[in-house]
Image: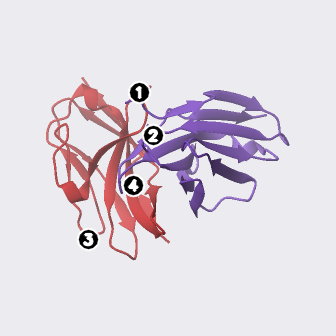
Chain colours: A red, B purple
Amino acid sequence: AQRVTQPEKLLSVFKGAPVELKCNYSYSGSPELFWYVQYSRQRLQLLLRHISRESIKGFTADLNKGETSFHLKKPFAQEEDSAMYYCALHIYSGAGSYQLTFGKGTKLSVIP
Amino acid sequence: KAGVTQTPRYLIKTRGQQVTLSCSPISGHRSVSWYQQTPGQGLQFLFEYFSETQRNKGNFPGRFSGRQFSNSRSEMNVSTLELGDSALYLCASRHGTYEQFFGPGTRLTVL
């Protein structure tokens, strides 16, 4: 069965410091991984997906199949980055159906 | 476009009752998925509907059911409520193959 692990419940960093949110996955198929973010009082939204290999709000994430990891990184944290971050495995379940398997999330707190 | 809407936003029920939650997807989105979010288990997939058909179901008991209407609006129903059903229930709609757009959720409290 598929599984996503985010080892840190809470991560506190100072403004301007680098950030790395860890994510490891377990999946027998070809993985497709996403990062979702939830800012205070806002709904869950997609931050980035590994296939697009883009940088969103200064965040990047590289899929490492050897280490089964998809860590989220940003070189310089900003206060507005404070939020809950969820790593998710996007799985095709057949018959045109997709589902997301989420990690339990990491709360990022950026200290001014 | 208006985002995904969910009603009601808050519900309080007692054990043994049943509840129905509603989700209106983004216009043009035909896929609707439901997730349960709890502090202990995190976000867990409940089921997905597409064109009024359930295409996939997560590992939840039969007390959890849903349906989708011809206008893509979806409802989920939980019968014989238990204390452990207290959670935030999120609905998400999708048009393409990957990005799901989430609603604000319905907070269900079972007393």
**Screen quadrant of the C terminus of chain B:** top right
**Screen quadrant of the N terminus of chain B:** top left
Residue B80's place in the image compared with B57, above or below, is above
Marks 3 & 4 on one chain: yes
Cα distance in 3D space between marks 3 and 4:
15 Å
Q: Which residue is mark 1?
A: A40
Q: Which residue is mark 2?
A: B102
- Sequence-wise, the earlier of marks 3 and 1 is 1
Q: Which mark is residue A65?
A: 3
**Number of other residues with Cα within 10 Å of mark 4, as a class: few under 14, some 14 to 19, many 20 or more:** many
Which residue type does callout 3 highlight? Lys
Element type at mark 4: strand
Left or right, A5 with respect to B66, comes to: left
Q: Chain of mark 1?
A: A
Q: Give the image location of residue A72, x and y in percent.
A: 25, 50
Q: Residue furthest right?
A: B16
Q: Chain of mark 3?
A: A
Q: Nearer the viewer, residue A51 or A60?
A: A51
Which residue type does callout 2 highlight? Phe
Q: Which residue is mark 4?
A: A88
Front: mark 2 or 4: 2
The structure residue drawn at horizontal position 42% and vertical position 58%, both measured from the top left corner, is A5
Which residue type does callout 1 highlight? Ser
Q: Give the image location of residue B59, x and y in percent.
A: 62, 62
Left or right, A35 with respect to B103, comes to: left
**Number of other residues with Cα within 10 Å of mark 1, as a class: few under 14, some 14 to 19, many 20 or more:** few
